Amino acid sequence: MSKLIFEDEDVKSHANMDYIQNGGHAQQNGIPAPVEAENADMPSALCCGATGEAYDLTKRINPEDKRLLNCRQVDVNQLMPLKYEWAWEHYLNGCANHWMPTEVPMQRDIELWRSNALNEAERKVILRNLGFFSTGESLVGNNIVLAIFKHITNSEARQYLLRQAFEEAIHTHTFHYIVESLGLNAREVFNMYHEVASIEGKDKFVMELTEDVLDPNFTTQSIEGIQKFVKNLIGFYVIMEGIFFYSGFVMILSFHRQNRMTGIGEQFQYILRDETIHLNFGIDLINTIKLENPEIWTTELQRDIYDLIHEAVEYEVIYARDCVPDGVLGLNEDLFREYVQFIADRRLERIGLQAVYGSKNPFPWMGETIDIAKEKNFFETRVTDYQSAGSLQWDD
């Protein structure tokens, strides 16, 4: 199994190795000047064959004829042979990381929550993050099912999307399990995205990027259509899963580092591990669409992406300020601003754009936190690095 890519590593994803921009471009108002794509007014390349001829779907397919978008001539039901090994690799990584929230004991969390050992500021941090994540995961899952899946015409990419949608359901299940375990008001927690302004702002921001793609008449048959689709992918993979989730990870895992709320902390570790794969898949998806449709990568689209990232950073800083207004757990607004800017730079670089903030990572321990082994005792037999099916490793 390949090594996962974490948020604080200086790496490039599989699909953008050949065209990541170097640092020599001019800047405008501190933002790198976008690089205009060649032949930007040309239509997208034909998906199958040199002349786009229709194929007999009863015949065996050539993997080179498979494309991520607009490839109706290849039977999407035929998974093999693969064209995009990276998509299958992400699928296998996701399957190997399978977990369920009910595997995680919550007794220590319940006892701590019912005691007087947590102050009001700490309880607010926990509740705010449960409120955001409980609906944020649902928004991502709905976007996969309703907006992304039907426009992806490659079978191995669809295979991963099915896996990811299931994982989003597991994550939503997680928050139900936590709320039920702690005896919290479920209606209060799950309705925070309507009642708490900092959560509502983030959710509305990403939902607006879905509107065009959810239009029944939307297609990716034009340059403009593909650009809107890419914006949707950036909104959910790069911003929601790649930026908006990370302040919450830091907050909850800060409790876990102090050996408090360890059940919630363990579940957030598993979610973080899942989200790392989601982000990597999304980056590869975006970069491969760019490679196959270079005419979409216009100055205007690049400028729009910079604007979206900048706006997302500000939303996330507002959220962090709302969660820790007076500082708690050694965390404060200034640290989160630096961290979110650092994360945003890494996301920009991985989709072929330049970093704009130059901030450092104030939480280097986050990269280590995800490297976890699941060890559970089932029926007096220990499961080490718990995975599923043939990936299980048993110690007597």
Image (tube, rainbow, N blue to C red):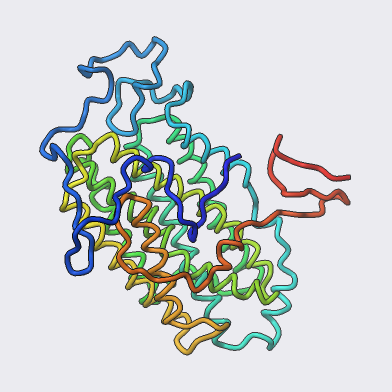
Q: Residue at x 43, y 35 (%)?
A: 158
- Residue 127: x and y in percent read 53, 76
Query: What residue is at 18 percent from the left and 43 percent from the top?
Result: 37
Q: Quick check: 316 above or below 141?
A: below
Q: Report the residue at 27% width, 59% height from top.
A: 208
Q: Residue reaching furthest left?
A: 41
| For residue 287, above or below residue 194 | above
On the image, the x and y values in percent for residue 182 come to 65, 73
Count the marks: 0
Residue 122 % position (x, y): 57, 83
**Is 223 positioned to the left or the right of 258 in the image?**
left
What residue appears at the point 46 percent right and 36 percent down from the top-left corner? Answer: 87
Q: As displayed, is residue 218 above or below residue 254? A: above
Foreground pick, 282 / 366: 366
Report the quarter where the C terminus lies. Answer: top right
**Residue 114, placed above or below residue 296:** below
In the picture, measured across the screen, residue 348 lies left or right of residue 379, that is left
Q: Which percent across, then down, holds residue 50? A: 23, 17
- Choose between 12 and 81: the one closer to the eye: 12
Q: Quarter of the image containing the N terminus?
A: top right
